[in-house]
Image (cartoon, grey):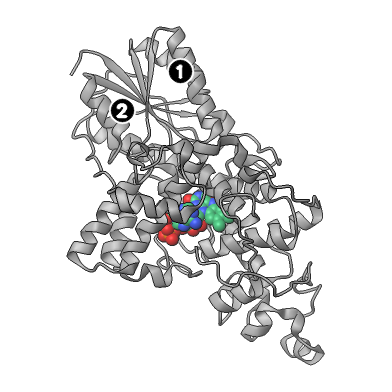
């Protein structure tokens, strides 16, 4: 241990468990100043005109920061909270505390890289150093069989090589104590102070009520894996659409850093020893590798992921049609399975993986609209937004990313396969409640008598479909 004070800048790693940035700084310095910075750029507008961070994710972020502060205080430390650009705020704080080094997580997306570069320059000019660590994936890039610039662009060979050669590293325990010198702590800004004029609404129909922070994330592991014992059937239920437990719901904490993937993996391994090891326990790790894959892909391809042609530079003639886009975004396309999913997203900030795949495919492949606008809309709305996961998955579905196959989904077939009783569709579209499942999924197939019997007039009670769907599509893309 040296006599120095070190600054620890929390980014998407808002936790104490398995946080190598914090743990190594605590080990290396006699005191640490933990800092979280609300960067106004994260609360600006996307290239496509949507708020970058919708109020639900902003609230989740506030809760995460408050929880981090409480946990640090429990260990004798403090969390300094500031608003501003990290490259301006952190050098000043480092100077005020005479800290030689700022420690932080490194992230692969270009905006975050840009901030790191600007901060490194500002610190260097002041005779200080930035020490970054990669901390957010299950497997560490240094352990990869192939260095990031040369990794495969196709998931399966990459995954097979990883599974054959790497065991994830063990998670690091949270430090027992954190010594923070006297600081001016600052308060966690309210939503109003962050520029929101309304509180996020809640909806009783939501699959899950997400609360930000490491404490809630760890409680969700306890609930899903141990108390409700749902991991044992994850592979069979993960394509579900309704309720809290068809999938883990870990994504908002993984994206915001409340949970570490290595901690989840360690819990899965413990579960395999203490309860059962089966395809489902394997499959959760498999999905965490999908997440890793997109993180490494972003580190490899960077800004190309945001280009219309994507990493494959494909020349596709995407349409721009504001009315069509709004119908998709508002859940008024006239295709119930698409509309129910979009209404869930709008009402809750969360959507199942099956739902995301279908609405993305509908926008890109059935409507032919610029996929980046859909991705940008998701960015605005999702509580679990993560740039590599979101843009990587969108590009994948739109045919501009890590898959050379046509990923068009037959949304009508998908609706019948994954929502056979139309329970999900009527959950989110009450105007179709009471219809037999076949009509609830395809209300345009009702004849006059059926329409009268059920009291539904298309174009009045529910929109007519905005596009004719052909059946020549992939039926079950089960990624
Ligand atoms: C168009 C589209 C956009 C998406 N945008 C995001 C996003 O912004 N943020 C995000 O976290 N996930 C995104 N996903 C991936 C996936 O849909 C969510 O991670 C998952 O639905 C979250 O619910 P869960 O935690 O219950 O998932 P589970 O099924 O329980 O999976 C466990 C974890 O594995 C990871 N995972 C699962 N599926 C995928 C996948 N297809 N790709 C990458 N990682 C995966 C996630 O971290 C997830 O939390 C997107 C998928 C699509 C098709």
Q: Does the residue labelled 1 lie within 8 Å of ligand 1?
A: no
Foreground label between 1 and 2? 1
Q: How crowded is mark 1: few (under 14 residues within 10 Å), some or many (20 or more)?
A: many
Q: Mark 1 points at which residue?
A: 120
Q: Nearer the viewer, residue 39 or 109?
A: 109
Cα separation, mark 1 vs mark 2, equals: 24 Å
Q: Can residue 429 be seen in this view?
A: yes
Position of residue 407 measured from the top left corner of the image (x, y, whole percent): 62, 62
Eyeballing the image, is 316 above or below 223? above
Q: Is mark 2 within 8 Å of ligand 1?
A: no
SS at badge 1: helix
Eyeballing the image, is 286 above or below 30? below
Eyeballing the image, is 456 above or below 47? below
Residue drawn at (33%, 12%) of the image: 100
Q: Mark 2 points at which residue?
A: 78
Position of residue 103 measured from the top left corner of the image (x, y, whole percent): 35, 24
Residue drawn at (64%, 49%) of the image: 377
Position of residue 446 measured from the top left corner of the image (x, y, whole percent): 75, 86
């Amino acid at each position: 241990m040296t006599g120095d004070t070190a600054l620890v800048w929390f980014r998407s790693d808002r936790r104490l468990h398995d946080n190598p940035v914090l743990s190594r700084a605590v080990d290396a310095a006699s005191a640490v100043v933990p800092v979280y910075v609300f960067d106004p750029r994260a609360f600006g507008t996307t290239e496509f005109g949507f708020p970058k961070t919708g109020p639900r994710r902003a609230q989740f972020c506030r809760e995460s920061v408050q929880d981090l502060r409480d946990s640090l205080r429990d260990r004798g430390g403090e969390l300094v909270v500031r608003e501003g650009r990290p490259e301006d705020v952190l050098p000043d704080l480092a100077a005020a505390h005479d800290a030689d080094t700022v420690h932080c997580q490194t992230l692969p997306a270009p905006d975050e890289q840009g901030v790191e570069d600007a901060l490194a320059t500002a610190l260097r000019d002041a005779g200080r150093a930035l020490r970054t660590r990669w901390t957010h994936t299950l497997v560490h890039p240094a352990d990869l069989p192939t260095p990031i610039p040369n990794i495969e662009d196709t998931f399966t060979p990459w995954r097979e090589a990883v599974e054959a050669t790497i065991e994830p590293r063990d998670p690091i325990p949270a430090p027992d104590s954190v010594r923070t010198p006297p600081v001016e702590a600052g308060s966690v800004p309210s939503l109003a102070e962050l520029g929101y004029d309304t509180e996020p609404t809640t909806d009783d129909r939501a699959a899950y009520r997400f609360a930000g922070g490491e404490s809630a994330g760890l409680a969700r592991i306890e609930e899903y894996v141990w108390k409700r014992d749902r991991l044992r059937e994850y592979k069979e239920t993960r394509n579900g659409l309704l309720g809290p437990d068809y999938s883990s719901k870990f994504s908002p904490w993984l994206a915001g850093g409340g949970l570490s993937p290595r901690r989840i993996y360690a819990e899965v391994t413990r579960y395999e020893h203490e309860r059962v090891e089966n395809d489902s326990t394997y499959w959760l790790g498999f999905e965490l590798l999908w997440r890793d894959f997109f993180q490494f892909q972003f580190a490899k391809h960077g800004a190309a992921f945001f280009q219309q042609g994507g990493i494959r530079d494909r020349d596709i003639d995407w349409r721009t049609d504001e009315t069509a886009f709004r119908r998709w975004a508002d859940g008024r396309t006239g295709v119930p399975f698409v509309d129910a999913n979009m209404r869930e997203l709008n009402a809750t900030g969360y959507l199942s993986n099956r739902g995301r795949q279908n609405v993305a495919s509908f926008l890109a492949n059935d409507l032919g609209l610029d996929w980046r606008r859909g991705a940008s809309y998701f960015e605005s709305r999702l509580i679990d937004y993560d740039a590599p996961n979101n843009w990587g998955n969108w590009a994948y579905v739109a045919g501009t990313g890590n898959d050379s196959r046509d990923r068009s989904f037959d949304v009508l077939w998908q609706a019948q396969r994954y929502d056979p009783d139309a329970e999900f569709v009527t959950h989110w579209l009450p105007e179709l409640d009471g219809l037999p499942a076949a009509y609830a999924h395809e209300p345009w197939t009702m004849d006059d008598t059926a329409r009268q019997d059920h009291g539904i007039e298309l174009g009045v009670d529910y929109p007519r479909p905005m596009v004719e769907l052909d059946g020549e599509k992939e039926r079950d893309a089960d990624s």
